[in-house]
Amino acid sequence: MTLRKVTKNSGSSQNQEAALKLVYLALQNVSKKWNTVQGWRDALRQFAMRWPERLQQGRGG
């Protein structure tokens, strides 16, 4: 949503390099607010059911 807002408000008269810089800076700003992954416990449960040996390897077991 943040990236869409930034690119929508910037207009279409810019070149590709300027657009990439704009997206990069927007990601830098929004990533400061990211602190948790939503639904991580549910995802971890699914991983454990599907690939238990990989989780054991990752934990050093």
Image (cartoon, rainbow, N blue to C red):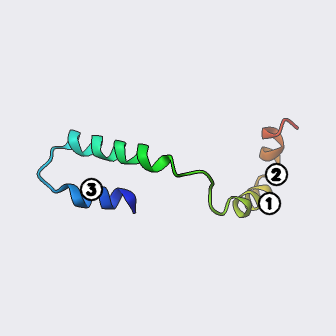
Residue closest to the far top: 60
Residue extending farthest right: 61
Name the kind of residue labelled 1 in the image: Met
**Rendering quarter of residue 58:** top right
Q: Residue at x 49, y 47 (%)?
A: 31
Q: How many marks?
A: 3
Residue drawn at the location 21% of the way across and 41% of the way down? 18
Where the N terminus falls, by quadrant?
A: bottom left
Write down the residue under mark 3. 7
From the viewer's perspective, is residue 27 above or below residue 48?
A: above
Q: Quadrant of residue 28?
A: top left
Q: Amino acid at mark 2?
A: Pro
* Residue 49 marker: 1
- The amino acid on which the numbered mark 3 sits, given as a three-letter code, is Thr
In the image, taking residue 15 as reference, residue 59 lies left or right, namely: right
**Tag of residue 52:** 2
Crowd around label 1: few <14 · some 14–19 · many ≥20 (10 Å): few
Q: Nearer the viewer, residue 23 or 32?
A: 32
Q: Position of residue 22 (x, y in %)?
A: 28, 45
Circles 1 and 2 in contact, beta carbons < 8 Å: yes
Q: Position of residue 12 (x, y in %)?
A: 15, 55
